[in-house]
Image (cartoon, rainbow, N blue to C red):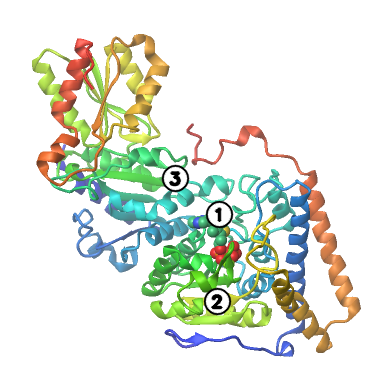
Amino acid sequence: MSKANYYLQTPRKHEVTSFDRELVLGFLKEMVRIREFESRAEEQTLAGNVVGGIHLAIGHEAVAVGVMQALRREDYVTGPHRGHHLVLAKGSDMKNVMAELLGKATGISGGRGGSMHMADAETGLLGVNGIVGASIVIATGAAFSAKYLGQDRVAVAFFGDGGSNKGQFHESLNMASILDLPAIYVCENNEFAVETAVSYSTGVDNIAERGSSYRMPGIIVDGLDVLDVYVAAKEARQRAVQDSRPTLIEAKTYRFKGHSIGDKEDYRTKEEVQERMKSDPIFKLKHRLEEAGWLSEQQWNELKSEVDREVETAVQFALNSPLPSAATALHHVYAKEMF
Amino acid sequence: MREITFASAFAEAVHEEMDRDPTIFVLGTDIRIRGGHFGQLKDIGQTFGPKRVVDSPISEAAMVGLSLGAAMTGLRPICDLNFEDFYLGAMDEVVNQIAKVRYKFNGQFKCPLVIRASSGAARATGPQHSQMLEAWFAHVPGLIVVAPSTAEDAKGMLKTALRGEDPVIFSFHKMLGNMKGPVPDGDYTTPFGQANIVKPGTDVTIAAYSIMVPKSLQAARELEKEGISAEVVDLRTIVPLDVNTVAESVKKTKRLVIAHEAYKFGGMGAEIAAQIGEAVFDYLDAPIVRVGSKHAAIPVSPVLQEQITPGKAEVVAAVQSVMEGVVRV
Ligand SMILES: Cc1ncc(C[n+]2csc(CCOP(=O)(O)OP(=O)(O)O)c2C)c(N)n1
Ligand SMILES: [Mg+2]
């Protein structure tokens, strides 16, 4: 791929059969894992077992899976407050992710972080983040690091449409452009920041167009189509490692659930949500696989029950895990305990 | 021992450490040729080249955020923010991100980085180029905060910072930059959390840091003429804070004055006074008195600035008041 300056790419439709069958079946399973995890996380929240608020990523599955499947394990990822799908898709063990939501010692952040502060040094997840915009600067630094150390590695920042209005977004994209960093900026545009519509809050029609200010391609993908996301992310990764140039990807998706659990959703109608759920990324892919003759009902049922078992195991693990020891509350403030 | 300036000692540490450790890089504005606004890192751009001495756009949030991402992934950034006042464009990165990254992720990541900025008032530096924010940083768990006053400590403490595993806020007072002091040859480090008695005395303790150390020493010399023997303690690091050395000194002198250029209201002096009260109240023969800036922005006009920021005279007056047992505030 050539060194690319700004251009705007609109969504592309790829034939499912132009990909490896096992690969696409894997995408499907990953998306179902996230969906089921999120459903159980909601259930556990309503049951009062989750400590702190959570933001469900139902509707965002194809973005996480499409991007992560295009990455290598050693690539770095940061994400925002809505991030369970990113943590899972990057490869963390579901048991420890669920345990983190329940504030248990076996959680991936030892119960200190909860939903919005999960990280996994094993998978290159440099953290999801409670602060909108923060993921963007941190991934920029990881991309700097990869280039400095001459590693074949990229860093990906996920953030929302709301996050793209933060100064950190603009400072980072400019920095990545002038320093030629192997970074990929993935905006999950789900049309809302809490209740605020992107059409109101954002001074461009497509967030991808903001790439034009920073000499980087602005790639719009259908965030409900995992294949479109995957191809765009593969190309962006190649641009990052071969040309050391950043890419801005805008994944147009939709949040099927409230901003957080308990959101009354007065800013949109139930009908609107129902209508949009017809484009459910999981059922769309399932349908295309069936049409291609790549997925039988039996295979689907097997996939579903395998996932159900994994998620159930994770829930039981989390419920049965010990709480953090109170004596550890002051650990990890500094390298050595000081206070 | 050879005598060099505080700024040269700082730059020497950067040179030597960059020679030693290839993962150290400098990110700053106007850094590669000019060596930063004050030329504090002149020649390092020439020596180490653009890969390791990186000119940044004026993007404080991205500078500090980039430094964090780099520190989490194997590098050791020195982020030069130019003026301490410019932290305010990166406060989210400092407070919400850098300070908490080790803790919130349960020790999975460390954050070995140094942020250097020029602090304090110089001639006519005015409201937005004169601030001392160390009390803000001290209030945030996870940050190390250092404010050395001598060339020797500037070098030794930067080396400690660059060999440690925690984020370090390095307060470099503008008026210290050109001050000369003895600096040992060869490699050495200065530990964090150890105050230094820079002048022994018997009648009163003056605990100070940064620019108020040389000013307190001047005050102590003047007080000597009045027959008052002041012990001057240079705290050197704000976090970790060595209150023990101050407490031991107070046990001997029975009196304490705390001096910093940052605002007196809500400043480090309040914390130190409270800790001394908790530790050695029974030894005190007089109320603890604090010296710090009055509560206004730092005005440009030197006539007005002098009204706001403390100097030798304020330290002398504070000592006189605790000696008399009459506290004038
Ligand atoms: C700096 C900051 N401001 C405000 C918030 C509160 N907040 C949390 S999520 C959110 C909406 C973010 O919208 P978007 O970036 O589009 O992500 P989405 O929730 O849609 O996934 C807001 C305002 C925050 N966490 N951080
Ligand atoms: Mg949104």
State which chain disc 2 sits on: A
Q: Are marks 3 and 1 on the same chain?
A: no
Q: Are marks 2 and 3 in contact (CB under 8 Å)?
A: no
Q: Quadrant of ligand 1?
A: bottom right
Q: Secondary structure at mark 1?
A: loop
Can residue A114 be seen here? The reply is: yes
Give the residue at mark 3: B166
Q: Are marks 1 and 2 in contact (CB under 8 Å)?
A: no
Give the residue at mark 1: A130
Image location of residue B158, percent across then percent down? 32, 45
User: Does the beta carbon of the residue at mark 2 sit less than 8 Å from ligand 2?
Assistant: no
Three-letter residue code for mark 2? Glu
Can residue A149 be seen here? The reply is: no
C-alpha span from label 2 to label 3: 35 Å
Instruction: Give the vertical position of B140 relative to A6 (above or below).
Output: above
Instruction: Give the vertical position of A44 relative to A333 (above or below).
Output: below
Q: Secondary structure at mark 3?
A: loop
Q: In which quarter of the view is residue B250 placed?
A: top left
State which chain disc 1 sits on: A
Give the residue at mark 2: A250
User: Does the beta carbon of the residue at mark 1 sit less than 8 Å from ligand 1?
Assistant: yes
